[in-house]
Amino acid sequence: MGRLVYLDQEMAPGQFTYKVKINLDEYVLLAAEERGAVIPWVAVPARAFALVNRLLERIGSRERVYTTQGSIAQSSLAVFLTGELYELIDGSGLLSEEEKLLTIEELLRLI
């Protein structure tokens, strides 16, 4: 049986802030003091993916979000895989450099 989850978001473009709320927890994805230091359309998806991974870990899931560098920003792509499946795909040589899957830790280093 599923659980009820409350989701909300607060975006203030003029203040350069973006927050999401999940149940009673608030997560800052973009803070006003970061203006000029980060590219919002790269930082927000990367941080959202990192948040999803933390929530997946919290509930005991083995899956994590991976993405491609080419999909960063407004058309972000989330691929849910176990670590083992990621390693298998990453080591297969089947994906071009542009298609290569990134861990969210690698993605966060890009911002």
Image: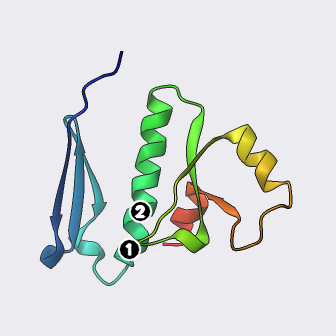
Few, some or many C-alpha atoms within 10 Å of disc 1 (few <14, some 14-19, many ≥20)? Answer: some
* Amino acid bearing label 1: Trp
- Quadrant the N terminus occupies: top left
Q: Position of residue 91 (x, y in %)?
A: 84, 54
* Amino acid bearing label 2: Pro
Horizontal side of 20 relative to 90 (left or right) equals left
Horizontal side of 91 relative to 25 (left or right) equals right
Horizontal side of 75 relative to 12 (left or right) equals right
Which label belongs to residue 85?
none
Q: Position of residue 2 (x, y in %)?
A: 34, 21
**Residue with the mark numbered 2:** 45
Q: Position of residue 46 (x, y in %)?
A: 45, 61
**Residue with the mark numbered 1:** 41
Q: Secondary structure at mark 1?
A: helix
The residue positioned 25% from the left and 67% from the top of the image is 31
- Residue 61 lies, with reference to residue 98, above or below; the image says above
Whether residues under marks 2 and 1 lie with C-beta atoms below 8 angstroms apart, the answer is yes
Few, some or many C-alpha atoms within 10 Å of disc 2 (few <14, some 14-19, many ≥20)? Answer: many
- Residue 35 lies, with reference to residue 71, above or below; the image says below
How many labels sit on residues?
Answer: 2
Residue 106, picture quadrant: bottom right
- Residue 71 lies, with reference to residue 39, above or below; the image says above
- Residue 55 lies, with reference to residue 96, above or below; the image says above
The residue positioned 17% from the left and 74% from the top of the image is 13
